[in-house]
Image (tube, rainbow, N blue to C red):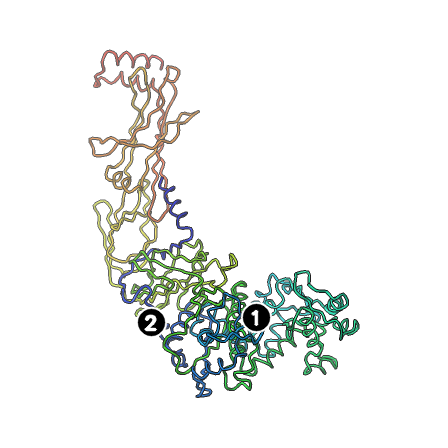
Amino acid sequence: MQAVKKERVRTLLSILLLVALLSTLILQMMLSPSGNDCFFSGDAETYYQSLLDAGFPEDYATALTELHLLHPTWEFKPLLVSELEPTHTWKYVLDRETADADLNLISKSDPYSAYWHEWNRDEPETGYFQPSRAAVAYFMDPRNFLNEADIFQFFDLSAGTDASIATVQAVLNGTFMESAKLENGKGYAAYFCEIGNALGINPVFLAAKVRQEQGVAGTSPLISGTCGTTLRNFYVHQTEYTDSGKAVLPPSSGHTSEELLALNGLYNYYNIKASGAGVFAIYYNALTYAQKGSSSKADEWGNSGAWNTRWKALWGGAEFLKNNYIDVYQPTIYLQKYNVDARSAGVFKKQYMASIPGALSEGRILYQSFAATDILDSACSFLIPVYKDMPTEISKDPAGATCSSTAIATTKYQFSGELKKPSRQRAENGAIYLNYETYQTASLSMEGVFTHSYGVKGLEYNWDGGEWTSVSDGKSLDATIPSNFEEGSTHILVIRQQTAYGSDASRKHCAYALAAVIYVKTIPAPTVTLTYQVANTTTTEQIRAGSEITLPITESNDFAGWLGSDGSFLPSGASYTVMSDRTFSAIFLDYDAIAGAALSLNPQNTHLRFSCLIRESTYKDLTERSLLQVQAKWKTEQDEGALTTVSSPKRQPDGRLRVDIETPTLSPADWNTPYSADFVFRISYTNETNRTLTYSIPVLRTAAQVASTALSCTSDNYSVNEIAVLQAIADTY
């Protein structure tokens, strides 16, 4: 029944994570602040201060410190827009970004109606309206997007150029690039690293960009090498729609078959200049740019900069991004949309997209490349704009998070944590923050549940920003204080949830969530008294709290275990961490079989009974705690009964308890069959180990032998009828 109950609890908590940092006594806990009250201490406070010193405002620094705890390998750098040009305050930049109706646009589809300009409904570009000032402020305010997913619009494309081939390969796994070779004999991952190193571009971004542009299968005509033929067929046959239903819109004149077929053998991996009205224009513009290619490489590539091999297209496209964006102060997706760096020659003008959610959506695509390929813990650098005189209140979403494609990522999911031990603490959509003091080499003990609307795959934890350790079953966690932690030092234990990211199309905005941040201070352990009691002998010793001991090994066959004053029951040789005064008493079963057997004199139910004596105090102490189970069985040379649990033992004059096992009813044919018995003591310990002791009565007895012995004993008074039964049985001996 108990096992069924436990399994039911596990089922009910299938989406809840039970954190059990085992074998711990928390000595002191300061309860303020706690729960959702975010606060930083120790190295976290130092990191927070370093962000302030770098120029980040407090609201930036708070969010970024939490991201640092979640992903310690991430680096955050401020782009101090107003220090580069003092006139570029928040208000000035917002004025410039909203002055021209063509500079920023928003779709005229109904889901985006909350972002439309209050009165301007002119259509400067088909399908778009001018956005309101509040809408531009929302998308431009970096403070809205300092979460795990949305921050990737600030990913610094010029940093992390030394990323490893293995990290890049993780992005390519499962795609057409995974194991393919280029014409120069190099694999895609190695070549992305070579390009990134040479040009100063993050190779992970390059790999993710190609994966994003070309998809997993890589079936785009722009990297097929035969797109010229595709264009020629569109043109000659005046194709209206592609097989997937896209409008082709081929021109009716102006081209020749020869000209279009000459575009075969060209590649454009990054879809550079792939724009226009209809598929024909998109492909044609992209390939004619590939035909022009990289003029700087013409001499090296044989008097032509054309992207006429795959590796040239990869290099040339990366060089285009470097020359046109990264090297001209637009090294992030955000800065390519909102060109606010005064050092850029095209400040407030050269913005490669007009749609105001563009940086947010493209940044999420980059994030999803990292999350889907499990490289979020790789080194990432983020360059985040900071403006002077920003409003105290973060710019609000005019749509109030009702437009799913433009709402802040954190509005798309909910998570919570609730601690039950050592005290009750709860946090909603944030981490639980706690201070603890405990002894050196102790363990942290917590029990609680963590939930996430995506579902929780598991828990991970680290000490002081080190390597993450996964929880094997997602429900229990051992976290011993590392032995190198000095007394008086403070350390940070971070626990994070790993969510069921990407398990369906809606779960694309949170791979990890910060579950708990615990500031642990190690304090000197006091001296405690360890006492052993064996029968009438008592020994004591003084040890430091937090010390791990090995309980004495006892060779006695009837030794049951060590019963601790804290209720623990452990076998000899077990390990135990002593946190306070503790007494261990040696418990012996003191079992002994009664020689011979008793014979029932009921003619209708004649049977033998075998008995064993056990110490009453031991039996009661252990059975009341469900730590001892006594079983027995009868046996012959040819047969044996099933093990039967013995209950209701009978108290004997010497203070011990008698436990019995009876044979089946014996017929006259069985009166000379020798019987014996086994008594089995099953002991369960609180450290979840077990021990079984078996005592076999060594002497075989028959009913005829017992009857004959009884008749020869003159001290026993039997009735006439009993003597007759005994005599009948004994006569067969």
Residue count near mark 2 (Cα–Cα under 10 Å), binned few <14, some 14–19, many ≥20: some
- Residue for point 35% across, 49% down: 687
Q: In this rendering, which labeled residue sits more in front, label 2 or label 1?
A: 1
Is the residue under label 1 in contact with that under label 2 (CB below 8 Å)? no
Query: What amino acid is found at the position of numbered circle 2 in the picture?
Result: Ser
N-term mark: 2 or 1: 2
Residue 698 in picture, x, y percent from top left: 36, 29
- Quadrant of the image for the C terminus? top left
Query: What amino acid is found at the position of numbered circle 1 in the picture?
Result: Gly
Residue corresponding to mark 2 = 41
State the mark number for residue 401.
Answer: none
Label 1, secondary structure: give it. loop
Residue 565 in picture, x, y percent from top left: 24, 50
Q: Is residue 462 left or right of residue 122?
A: left
Judge whether 726 appears above or below 179 on screen.
above
Residue count near mark 1 (Cα–Cα under 10 Å), binned few <14, some 14–19, many ≥20: few
631 or 101: which is nearer to us?
101
Residue corresponding to mark 1 = 127
Q: Is residue 49 left or right of residue 154?
A: left
Judge whether 692 appears above or below 639 on screen.
below
Residue 722 in picture, x, y percent from top left: 26, 14
Label 2, secondary structure: give it. loop
Q: Work out how far the residue at label 2 is from the one at label 1, CA to CA, in angstroms.
A: 51 Å
Q: Is residue 187 left or right of residue 86?
A: right
Q: Is residue 611 left or right of residue 150?
A: left
